[in-house]
Amino acid sequence: MSDGKARKLKEIMKYSDIETKRFGFRIYRGVVNDVNEKAILSAILENGVDIAILRVPSQRQFQIPRLERIGFPYLVADTLVRYRVDLAKYEPKSLRNRNLDFVQCLPEHAAPLGILVKSIFANYTNHYFSNPLLDRKDILAAFEDWALRYIGSDNEGRICWLVKQGDEYVAFATCAFDENLCEGVLYGVKSSASGRGIYGDLIKFTQRYFKNKGYSAMSVSTQVQNLAVQRVWSREGFKLSNSFATVHINSLLSRSVIEKRVIDIKVAASDILNCGEFSGDMNPLHFDDDFAKDIGFEGRIVHGLVLSSAISKYYGTEFPGKGTIFMGYSYKFLKPVYPGRSYRLTISFPFIDFQKGIYRSLAKVTGEKNDICLLSYNDLYKKAK
């Protein structure tokens, strides 16, 4: 891959090490101002992406159906709204609760911060919850990890406060900043302390902190359904600035919960003839080299059903094995398969629930240069013993 192409792919999405380690899927993230399905497909294939999390400006949301053309399962997971306040013109209000003690978090505060985050966000839903592949326990742990990363010096572009009322930690706030902009990243108030105006005081405190630091603008963001905090932001001078649709593309190209099975395959001319005679599909595209070349292929191409039979054979006779039932499948042909050439069939299982007998599998056919010819997503069922 050329350096120029690699740079373009990185502009679309970047590897998320934190999310990959947390959820066990190879996750990439990006913000795309236009849904260029060909570029997105290339980025996913080049990087072996399991889940691509893309933010699309809401004014471009009409472009999301273009993703149908790349053949990967995808879902619109949430809508993110972003608010902004002009700190140069806005004067933060005084705190309602004068007895709050804002303690800048240091490593020794990790335990109380973690307990607070898990309590506050136990039932909070965001785009992660929309993706059925992600474990709910991992999502809550992700919130905790997210907050803990803000512990430490405020010279590193991140800062976190624990908030005490009396002898009890009741809230926290995390913020990020660079040379030009500061952002309220994650705020939370424990349920037993709600209704006292503490959340509003978190906003006021962080506004004042960054205004005193000389910042002229501050942003905050949340899911569109989180109306309560948006009402607070509006009261404290924030205005809606933009919004994004969050899209998850579940391409599942790398993950497998069991060892991948690799099978070398080569389709013979007799296999094509047998398929044609059985199905009645005697399309000259599969039997006449000159006809296929006129269309733009290198020669006659293999029926898709021939490859489907090889995939079905593995599921029915090897794993999950006898009694396996197809519940659904989808195929994406990226390149033709030619008779007489060597190919490799790689079968992975990104998800298995042995108790329920549910299997989600990807069968991938690649050529001699490791170029992907076919991606076959299969939902299988085998009655549990």
Image (cartoon, rainbow, N blue to C red):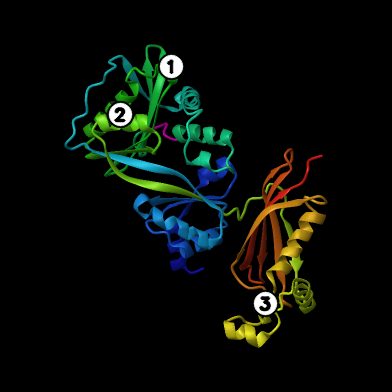
Q: Amino acid at mark 3?
A: Ile
- The picture quadrant where one finds residue 306 is bottom right
Residue drawn at x 36%, y 32% is 227
* Left or right: residue 271 compared with residue 232: right
Q: Which residue is mark 1?
A: 192
Quadrant of the rendering where the C terminus is positioned: top right
Q: Is residue 262 visible?
A: yes
Q: Amino acid at mark 1?
A: Ser
Spot the residue most to the top.
166
Comes first in the chain, label 2 or label 3:
2
Report the magenta residues as a range: 149-153
Q: Which residue is mark 2?
A: 232
Comes first in the chain, label 2 or label 1:
1
Report the number of numbered marks: 3
Residue 135's mark? none
Q: Badge 1 local density, few (<14 within 10 Å), some, or many (20+)?
A: few
Q: Secondary structure at mark 2?
A: helix
Kindly report the distance in space between the C-alpha atoms of the residues bearing marks 1 and 3.
Answer: 67 Å
Q: Which residue is mark 3?
A: 301
Residue drawn at x 18%, y 38% is 88
Q: Amino acid at mark 2?
A: Val
Comes first in the chain, label 1 or label 3:
1
* Left or right: residue 337 compared with residue 171: right
Nearest the eye: 269 or 177: 269
- The picture quadrant where one finds residue 147 is top left
